[in-house]
Amino acid sequence: MIREMAEDRTNVEKRVHEAYEKAQALQDKLNDVITFVDPDEQLKNLPEEGLFRGVPIALKDNVNTKGIRTTAGSRILSNYVPIYNAEIVDKLKAAGAVVIAKSSMDELAMGGTNLTCFTGAAHNPWDTRRMTGGSSGGSAALVASGVVPMAIGSDTGDSIRKPASHCGLVGVKPTYGRISRYGIIQYASSLDHVGYFTRSIEDACVTLKVLAGRDDRDMTSSYRPVDDYSALLNSDMHGKKIAVINNVVKNISNEETVKIFNDLMDKLRERGAKVDVYDFDEDLMRAILPTYFIIANCEATSNDSNLDGIRFGVREDGADMAEIMTNSRTKGFGPLIRRRFVIGSYGLFEENQERIFRKAQKVRRLIVEAMDKCLAEYDALIAPASGNIAPLIDADKDQDQLSDENLIAENYMAIGNFSGYPSMTVPMGFEEGCPIGVNITCRAWDEAGMFNIGKAIEEITGYKDLKCEVK
């Protein structure tokens, strides 16, 4: 789809303007855009060649764009206009992409619902009563509704892969360091990944080829050569060894989800894959969410200390500098963010670091070591990306947060951030007219292998280029 669009030079302006107008027309129903970006100047300066030439795209609003407001979904940054582009923006523009929107997101990327953006909740195109998932929900909604074929997201715990499940998309979080994070408003530095949404595996391959590579301005980015993922794409499953994460499957109460997943595994076996059930230590699996919560909140508290209303962002009045900062942060952040900063600050107190923050880092290492042991024998880990379709926006929030269904089945995908290994969600079925996805995690730098398994699943299900008519 992306490659075909890039090769079709005759309809570039028409296609981009149609996408821009469609995004605006759907805004009242989806509320998935924070800032619309006029495409005309970009169209005047398109390169002659490029894998994305004339392709309309959207950027999650934590991606810095020179001269274009970038809010990260937070009121405190609602007047922030960067003076530089993120590295991925320059790469996409060099490839010919045309940015038409900065998409809605959970405030400062902290959350899994896309309900906490200062502009209000984003709505799921498949059923506008439902969430998109977060924190990259606006980008997911723009791709699922057919506005753009690709949108950028970021993933710190599952913030691309869970919205991909809820919106029926391919959601890719590549290996840590595969894509530069220069110019991305950070959440938790050791966990943050830049990734993206597409509607097909082929488009996912093209997108990673454009985005990947070393950037000297991001010292965590890799020198490793970038593969031609499209040329390597091969859905032959013979000889592939896949481990089903049984801890996840057995803790999903929705029998329909489990049936869809098990049927898919049987079809992978029929195509030649060896698919085994694999059990991790249950205590380690229960520890994933609290470990993530401590590390992410501590790192976020440190990273976001510059959001004080003094250097940039919205400033509230006060009698002195301390009062200005207090008022700016109190009014600029939503209640969820304020709570997370309290937790992060507590974990970073000198007297607490060893027993809270350092302990969480040690548990993280144990979880990654358990993954490595499994991936020494298997090519991939696989499990449902969610136990259920997207929740209703006004659903009862009194879920048992300490249940194994929540701790394990709904939050296990943070293991991909702990390890930095490539992880991807693809559609596997529908329930009540809404999509649900399956997640694949592979060894570091094996994006090609991950795409191959994803392609086999895409062929089995027929769920390629899914998009919906918003009602």
Image (cartoon, grey):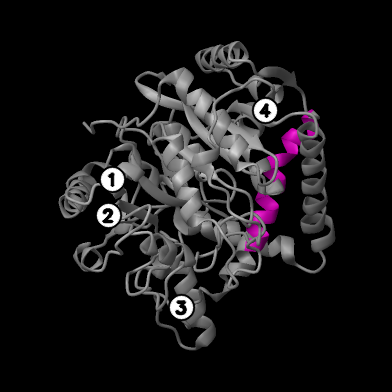
Amino acid at pointer 4: Asp
At 57% from the left edge and 57% from the top edge, which residue is drawn?
339
Q: Earlier in the sequence, mark 4 or mark 3?
A: 3
- In 3D space, how far apart are the residues under numbered discs 4 and 1 (Cα atoms)? 45 Å
| CB under 8 Å between discs 2 and 1 | yes
List the residue tagged with mark 4: 404
Residue closer to the observer: 292 or 167: 167
Q: Residues within 10 Å of mark 1 (few under 14, many from 20)?
A: some
> Which element carries disc 2, helix, strand or loop?
loop
User: Which residue corresponds to mark 2?
Assistant: 54
Spatial CA span between label 4 and label 2: 46 Å
Confirm or deny contact between disc 4 and disc 3 (CB under 8 A): no
According to the picture, the residue beneath numbered tag 1 turns out to be 5
Q: Could you tell whether 356 is left or right of 338 in the image?
A: right
Residue 271: percent from left, percent from top: 58, 15
How dense is the environment of label 3, judged by Cα within 10 Å: few (below 14), some, or many (20 and up)?
A: many
Q: Which residue is mark 3?
A: 309
Q: Is residue 94 above or below residue 138?
A: below
In the image, residue 195 sits, relative to residue 305, either above or below, namely above
Cα–Cα span, label 2 and label 3: 38 Å
